[in-house]
Amino acid sequence: MEKTTIFDIVIKLLEQRKFAELKLIMQQMNPTDIASIFDEAEAKDVPIIFRLLPKELAAETFAYLESEQQEQLINAFSDKEIKEMVNELFLDDTVDIIEEMPASVVSRILKNTDEATRRQINELLAYPDDSAGSLMTPEFVYLGKDMTVGEAFAKIRQVGVAKETIYTCYVTQERKLIGVVSLLELVTASDNTKIEEIMSENLISVGTKEDKETVATTLAKYDLLSLPVVDGENRIVGIVTVDDAIDVLQEENTEDIEKMAAIVPSDKPYFRTGVFETFLKRIPWLLLLMVSATFTGMIITGFEDKLSASVGVGIALTAFIPMLMDTGGNAGGQASVTIIRGLSLGDIELRDVFKVIWKEIRVSLLCGVVLAVTNFGKIMLVDRLLLGNESITVMVALVVCITLVLAVFIAKLIGCSLPIAAKAIGFDPAVMASPFITTIVDAISLLAYFLIAQALLHI
Amino acid sequence: MEKTTIFDIVIKLLEQRKFAELKLIMQQMNPTDIASIFDEAEAKDVPIIFRLLPKELAAETFAYLESEQQEQLINAFSDKEIKEMVNELFLDDTVDIIEEMPASVVSRILKNTDEATRRQINELLAYPDDSAGSLMTPEFVYLGKDMTVGEAFAKIRQVGVAKETIYTCYVTQERKLIGVVSLLELVTASDNTKIEEIMSENLISVGTKEDKETVATTLAKYDLLSLPVVDGENRIVGIVTVDDAIDVLQEENTEDIEKMAAIVPSDKPYFRTGVFETFLKRIPWLLLLMVSATFTGMIITGFEDKLSASVGVGIALTAFIPMLMDTGGNAGGQASVTIIRGLSLGDIELRDVFKVIWKEIRVSLLCGVVLAVTNFGKIMLVDRLLLGNESITVMVALVVCITLVLAVFIAKLIGCSLPIAAKAIGFDPAVMASPFITTIVDAISLLAYFLIAQALLHI
């Protein structure tokens, strides 16, 4: 692809220190691609390359950089350069950048910002992390309902380039949100049409404190380009644009996936996280789950006397423990992950809990019976006949297969109900995925295994 | 929230069969919300409610319905109604609908479509599933480079409402894509400016055969509202809009998550999938993984003589099998899921394989040592002292802890390399997640466990 070639050329020019050529080429490039050049550049070159960019493109590129690089650049900037940068940046990007910076850098940025912008930045910084308020930008176009389309265009022409989007304009009355009009509607209307006549009063909006995941899914659900954020009195205070909503969706998906895999979520890409940091994200759950496996061990130890009393059968039973545990874990994982995803996409609501349980019960019985029958055949054919293991009797196979049905049943039941329970009490359902479920299912199904063995094999 | 209230009112009106009121209220609603009313309605009411909607809103709502409801409606439609519907729908939506319909319905739709549209539909249907071609719509605005901004506006006014988006216009010359201009740039330029002067030649485009996940991530990466799709000769044949890209991202995320949980992916929401269908999506991997656990069982059986020779130690060792297996599975799952996600987000490339392995080796040793030390303390304090299990000697604890370090090491190594290997040979890395990894890690670490026990405990 052509893109790759340009990128290769740029890296070469950078190595050869041909800055004049570099400047010409970068002016033709996308801020996203320019930002990836910085990843390849040596630290000392970063400010040099950055200063080759024209002002506007520089600001756009800055917003795409990693926060380490942003900090490094700000430290290299003069006060004048900081001032220019903040003027060019969209306010929500400035706030995102500030949130990642150490206090000394923040105060330098704020010092070089005019009074009005500083006030807006401080307002945005005051919203809790992960809220609509922290995600939005106050840079939107608002119109009055008595304006004509011609007047609206005059206003858009005047303020347009400084706004994050002009494609959806918001109609306000005493700062309250009363309507919305798309630029498509403005373009296709005649100049003296009143905004009131073409605006839609069917408004989708979110409150400033709404969780940012809800904000993103709402925007996606209604196929919007921007979503207005209103305060307690329905006054519009900002908008969230579709590009930021996509970023939130991708981040939340990564976070869910990490939680499902028993990892403490991180918001940094793989290679930006150091070895020790990665270790710290992974060890807590490993430790917790390891220690909880003590119970499973205690169950085996508890049946010690019985297992050792009939050695052959004891070992035969032991040999099936890994299969029972894995199958239980997998069956539970399937149910929990399906429910977690359904909850996160809004396909499943809290009130559906009994519908979910009833469905999972039926699915688990179907799965359990098919697995048990297959397993019975496999045990008798492979383990007994083919491998000639004499201690594996029909009764042993029966014990294993009855436990299998039970383990799958319990696994699916726990797997589907724990995520819903977690959500009901305000926890993140994603934590209730395979690793957590496995630990519980292991203990219960092992206990069942030995009790069934005791009853049927009289060990 | 206000939305919920309107929804409740509507359902009530529907129950009371007050269609006149229903009609008034629905006209004020969003197509997305109207579509969710149909989910609550009885089958026989669906065409009645649908016919209450004004034509344009009806078409928009139709695109949001489930395919069963769409089929039901088309069967209830007259030929004239079908004709009107296809005229109102965007072409990519029509194609999406047709793809889900049985042949008889498809031929009825095509029969009621004019020649030109039918040709376009057939062209779009010819693109492979999951390709940019199948995702795009040919309804975009194209301009000539010699047009003035005034002429461009005249064209947009004329064709605008029939196009999926007018916010990004594409500049073509002999159908070849040569530039792009945003409506913002058009609005802020003077009427007699030439398009050539304000268009950007820095083009991001994809080929018709590009995988739809790549299309969506490209659009997201460059923060675009639409992405042009070009044929082999760089002629623009369609565009993909941001709302469709979001849907693809969410579907692909769900698919990855399902594969990671050993489920055959489904594209239907939880409650739209029947019990038997859900069973069919889950049983293949459960069966495969259950049967592969045979090897783990064989390893235990293989050490049967040794385990039964020293009964106390044998049972003590057995009691730690679940803990070792779970920890190995969790450690491997963490690595594999991190790498799978990194690959899917583009943070990790195939060429990074050795960087990944080197990082995971260090992380695994850190994790392994911390787990082993904790576990050693736990075994000696809890299992031996507190629970008074005499068969657990320092040597037994050592065997368990050495195996633990080894199991975590192997798990992370396999967990990080299998997804990359899968991608290298063209398989989906997502399949190489916890369940699959667990099965392999179980067998290897059990083997290691018994070999280490043999060497250190002389069993």
Image (spheres, coloured by chain):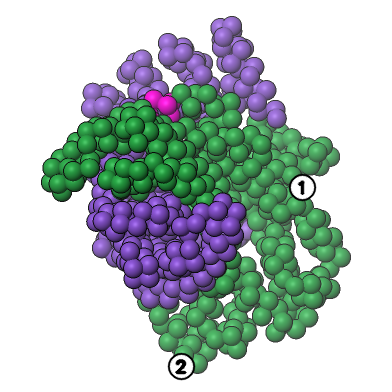
Chain colours: A purple, B green
Q: Which residue is mark 2?
A: B16
- Residue A6 horizontal side relative to residue A430, left or right: right
Q: Residue at x 72, y 64 (%)?
A: B99
Quadrant housing residue B426: top right
Q: Residue at x 54, y 44 (%)?
A: B432
Kindly identify which chain the residue marked by label 2 belongs to: B
Q: Position of residue B114 (x, y in %)?
A: 84, 68
Q: Residue at x 57, y 72 (%)?
A: B276
Quadrant into which the C terminus of chain B falls: top left
Q: Position of residue A61 (x, y in %)?
A: 48, 28
**Membership of B221 in magenta stretch:** no
Q: In this view of the protein, which residue sits in the foreground, A172 or A358? A: A358
Q: Which comes sooner in the sequence, label 1 or label 2?
A: 2
Q: Is residue B301 visible in the rendered structure shown here?
A: yes
Name the magenta segment's main secondary structure.
helix
Q: In this view of the protein, which residue sits in the foreground, A332 or A43? A: A332
Q: Is residue A48 above or below residue B282?
A: above
Q: Position of residue B277 (x, y in %)?
A: 58, 69
Kindly identify which chain the residue marked by label 1 belongs to: B
Q: Secondary structure at mark 1?
A: strand
**Membership of B360 in magenta stretch:** yes
Tell me which amino acid carries mark 1.
Val
Q: Position of residue A238 (x, y in %)?
A: 37, 50
Q: Which residue is mark 1?
A: B237
What's the distance in space between the residues labelled 1 and 2, CA to CA? 49 Å
Quadrant housing residue A424: bottom left
Specify few, some or many for label 1: CA neighbours under 10 Å numbering under 14, 14-19, or 20 or more.
many
Q: Residue at x 43, y 29 (%)?
A: B360
Residues shaded magenta: B359-364
Tell me which amino acid carries mark 2.
Gln
Quadrant housing residue B422: top right
